[in-house]
Amino acid sequence: MTGHPHTDAEMPCRDLVELVTAYLDGALDDADRRRFEGHLAECEDCVAFVDQIRTTIAGAGRSGARAPPLPAALREEARRAFRSWTP
């Protein structure tokens, strides 16, 4: 392990959190995907976070129902919370 994974210069946890949806959708370019996966190789907290997001997406897909859109204020509040999240 090279350095503390939460402050890794290649991809800090905060950046991983912001890219998790693109990663799971297969939408990251090769360089970002390698950085993302490199971070996961060193950070158990982020592995758990990505697994939770995968589980949530899978569960939502099985429900068969589409949730109504969130109000704009609630979406923005959630974005702010995730931007400031640190495992």
Image (spheres, grey):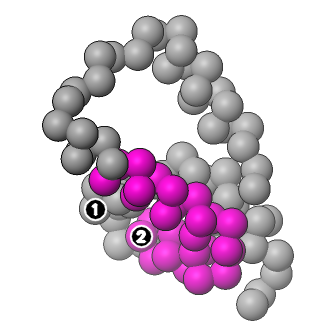
- 75 or 18: nearer the eye? 75
Up-down: is 16 above or below 37?
above
Residue holding disc 2: 33
Give the crowd class for mark 1: few <14, some 14-19, many >=20 residues within 10 Å.
Answer: few
- Horizontal arrangement in the rendering, residue 12 relative to residue 32 (left or right): right
Residue, x 51% and y 56% (percent of image)?
A: 52
Which residue corresponds to mark 1? 26
Labelled pair 2, 1 in contact (Cβ < 8 Å): no
Locate residue 49, reporting x and y percent: 58, 58
Q: Nearer the viewer, residue 32 or 5?
A: 5
Q: Check if residue 56 falls in the magenta segment.
A: yes
> Within the image, what quadrant is residue 60 found in?
top left
User: Can residue 9 be seen in this snapshot?
Assistant: no
Give the residues in magenta. 32-58
Question: What residue type is disc 1 on?
Answer: Gly
- Disc 1 element: loop
Toward the front, the furthest residue is: 63
Residue 6: x and y in percent read 77, 66
Disc 2 secondary structure class: helix
Height in image: 41 above or below 64? below
Query: Is residue 40 left or right of 68 when viewed as pictured?
Result: right
Residue at 79% x, 65% y: name it: 7
Residue 35 is covered by the magenta coloring: yes
Residue 66 seen in this snapshot: yes
Determine the main secondary structure of the stretch shown in magenta.
helix
**Residue 46 in which image quadrant:** bottom right
Seen from this angle, which residue lies furthest right?
4
Asked where in the image residue 23 lies, by quadrant, the reply is bottom left
Figure quadrant of the C terminus: bottom right
